[in-house]
Structure formats: structure tokens, C-alpha cells
Amino acid sequence: MGNVNFIGLKSRIMAFFLGSLVFSGAVSQAQGIMETFRKPKHGNIYVIAHRGAHNSIPENTLAAYRKAIELGCDFVEIDLRRTKDGRFVSIHNATIDKYVNGKKGRVGDFTLAELKRMDIGSRVGPEWKEERIPSFEEILELCKGKIGIYLDLKEPYIKEQAAIIKKYGMERDVIWYISPGHMKVVNDIKKYCTACIPMPDPGPARNIKKIEEEVHPRILATDMDHLNKAFTRIAHEGNMLVFTDDKREGVAEWSKMIKIGTDGIQTNEPEKLIEFLQKRQDEHE
């Protein structure tokens, strides 16, 4: 990739580290944190596998997360929900209706053991019939040391969720997506996990300054409805990285996103995105 863009990203990553140190109050641990927060594997763009790499694989399963690791993605996106007995699992919808043949009900109405007996893979293909809804602990065990986690807080129970992340020593490996209507959640993250990384979604660019003053994030989330040059300019001036959800999942859109200045792309097509980034990098060498 171009040298100017690469140098700019390195500066933003350095600012991310330093800002995170102020956020956590751990200035004396500067070197350790700089070494533990992952850098992008494919040039200067982070690749986030939405619900794992789930083409022909059941989404939000350990199989989809394993595939993302094999591909060399930087993060897997997971959707965290709470079970009846207070455990946490990754499943996008609030109900199991879409995922389990012949059963219906809310995720929160089942215990972890009951959910584990449900086959969520056969709907994709008979070879996946043993795939089950994964627990948060299983995901952390699989991903630790291999890939980061983009945590979509469908149901925020910050104290309990932070305790699990801290148990696995993965505070710097998990970024917490915070939707525009839940900014108060960041206060709980600060309270229960000072080293954790909140990633608020400010909505339009005009809200970034306010979010920066109130939350002091080092990374922002957005989508193609709000990504524009003003958004990335304001974010980068505040030393914040920008992770963006794609919409059309193709080279034309990814090229546009990179030109605008996004630092990370969340997609349902991580393999194709990686191929595109590698080709782009080869062309600029």
C-alpha cells in the first residue's frame, strides 16, 4: 500500500495505544500494551469476519470462527446473549426460531445445557449437524492468541462479561461495540474493566466530537450510511481508528471505503476481502 497511508495508520495505532493508556491509567505498562494490541495482518486494513467466516458454514459457530482464523482475519464478530441460567452465548437473533428445526423460543428462556442439545448446523448442511451454539468461554478459548474479538453487545451485562474476559486475560483482544443508544454502557466498561476497549458508534460525523469528549474512545464503529471523509477526518484528528461495516460486499465498495479512510472493514466475505487487500498490496509494492 502507499507509504503515506501506511505511515498515517501507524501514527493512529500509536495514538490508540497512548490514548488507551490514559484511559486505563496504566502508563507504566506502555510497552506491554503496545505489544499486545494486534496490528492489521493485511497491509493497513483490519479484516473483521461478520459472525465468523460463514459462507457454507453455520454463522456464529466455532466452525465459522475457526475458518476466520484459518483465513487470517484480524477479528471475528460475535453477538452475545444471556441464557436462562446466566451464561453467555453467541447467537444473533433473540430467538432460536431461525436456527433450530422444529423448535422455537427466546434464547433467554433456555439454559446453556438446553441450548447445547440443539442442532444449529443441519439447516446449512448435514456435515454441520454437530455444530452447537457456542458459549462465550468456548469462543475465548478458541480465539486467544489467534484472533481478536469484535463483541456486539446484544444484551449488556458488563460486570459479568468483563469478568469472563479478564479471567482469560483478553482485555486487549476484545473490542466492545456500543450502539448509539447505549453510550452509558461505556461507564460500566470503565468501572469493571479499565483495560478493555470500548468502540462506540456515534452515528453521523457531527456526533463524534461529543462522543470523544464524553467517552474518550480510541476506536469508533460505523457503517456505509455514515462513513464519509468528514467522519474519518474528525476521527483521525482525534487519534481514533474507524471500523466500518460494508454493505455491498465487493471490490468497488471496499476500494471506496479505503479511499475515504476507514481502518477496518467488517464483512460477510472475509476471504474475498483478504484476496483484494493482498492484490492491492502487491500492486503498490
Image (cartoon, rainbow, N blue to C red):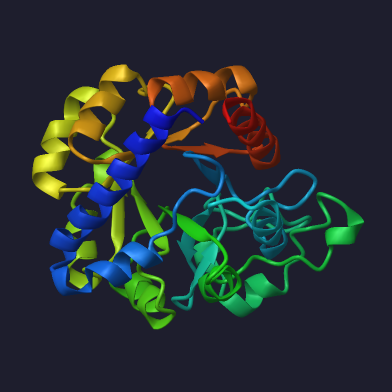
Q: Position of residue 223 (x, y in %)?
A: 42, 29
Q: Position of residue 182 (x, y in %)?
A: 25, 47
Q: Which residue is at 51% across, 70% downward?
A: 136
Q: Which residue is at 69% across, 56% downward?
A: 64
* Res. 220 in view: yes
Check the image and name the residue furthest to the right: 126
> Is 261 positioned to the left or the right of 67 in the image?
left
Q: Nearer the viewer, residue 281 or 204?
A: 281
Dividing the picture into quarters, in which one does residue 36 lie? bottom left
| Quadrant of the drawing holding the C terminus | top right
Instruction: Give the number of marks.
Output: 0
Dividing the picture into quarters, in which one does residue 18 lie? bottom left
- 285 shown above or below 218: above
Q: Nearer the viewer, residue 49 or 118?
A: 49
Q: Which residue is at 52% across, 29% downward?
A: 246
- 260 shown above or below 191: above
Q: Position of residue 3 (x, y in %)?
A: 42, 31
Dividing the picture into quarters, in which one does residue 174 lie? bottom left
Check the image and name the residue furthest to the bottom: 167
> Is 28 positioned to the left or the right of 106 in the image?
left
> Is 276 positioned to the left or the right of 171 in the image?
right
> Is 267 positioned to the left or the right of 176 in the image?
right
